[in-house]
Image (cartoon, rainbow, N blue to C red):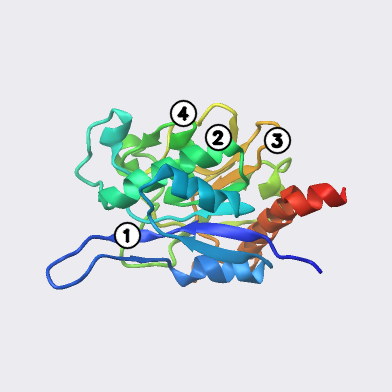
Amino acid sequence: MHTKPLIGLNADFRSKDGRSPAFSYVTAGYYDAIVAAKGIPVITPPLENEDDLNSVLDRLDGFVLVGGPDHDPRLDGFMRHPSVRAMASRRELFDRMLARLIGERHMPVYGIGGGMQLLNLSQGGNLFLHLPEDMPEALPHKDPQDQGHRHGLSIELDSLMGRVYGDGEIRVNSMHHMGVDEVAPGFAVTARCPDGVVEAIESQIEGWFALGTQFHPEAASASALDQRIFEEFIAVVEGATPAARLAA
């Protein structure tokens, strides 16, 4: 019997506020996209014990790092820009531990939005803290009045992005103010906005499938073609599971 791969999802976290208790949540688009691609999503709360997290990762076949609020640049040695809206510290510490362990394991991983930024940070890259200032000639990458804001995409054809989109005209959603600056060692840029902002990175490290997109293929503003990224990810994960290796 074919067993669908188990795909982890990290959860956002909101601290207790007044009468509201602390809680975790995941935007439905992430797990719906995994289900549509024939995977089984497993939501992972912000655990604090590394051994516990390793026990969870032992049971998973791949991981999707979701987007959300900003990562605190002070943890990477940079000053905090006024535009930064940092995530709760409990999620921040968990996400960084999670990304480190995924990297150490070379577990298949797909980072989306802030998840791509986290993937890049965890492997030694860094970020622009506010694109309107760091790249003033760049196109607008966030429009608070338009959740469906989109821009063009230029891709490297010899890549997963190339397999998904081919060489036609491509437009993707855009909802961020930070972005990848220096790309982590062992990773290559495989898609950019025409203004030069990094929109996708892929691992060049032998034996490790790791992909990141700055745009959000799980969002309501995504196109039907964007779902193929999840399908490609699940296909790679299925080939990397212990059952698949035994069958080979």
Say which residue appears at 25% left-offset and 65% top-offset: 22
> Which kind of residue does numbered mark 4 sit on?
Gly
Lower sequence index among marks 2 and 4: 2
Instruction: Decide: few, some or many residues near mark 4? Use Cα within 10 Å; few <14, some 14-19, many ≥20.
Output: few
Q: Which residue is mark 3?
A: 207
**Secondary structure at numbered mark 3:** loop
Q: Horizontally, is 179 left or right of 163 in the view?
A: left
Which residue corresponds to mark 4? 124
The answer to the question of whether label 4 and label 1 lie on touching residues, with beta carbons closer than 8 A, is: no
Query: Real-space Cα distance between discs 4 and 1?
Result: 25 Å
Residue 86 seen by the camera: no
* Most foreground residue, 135 or 81: 81
- What's under tag 1, amino acid-wise? Phe
Specify the quadrant that holds the N terminus: bottom right
| Residue at the spot of label 1 | 13
* Residue topped by disc 2: 104
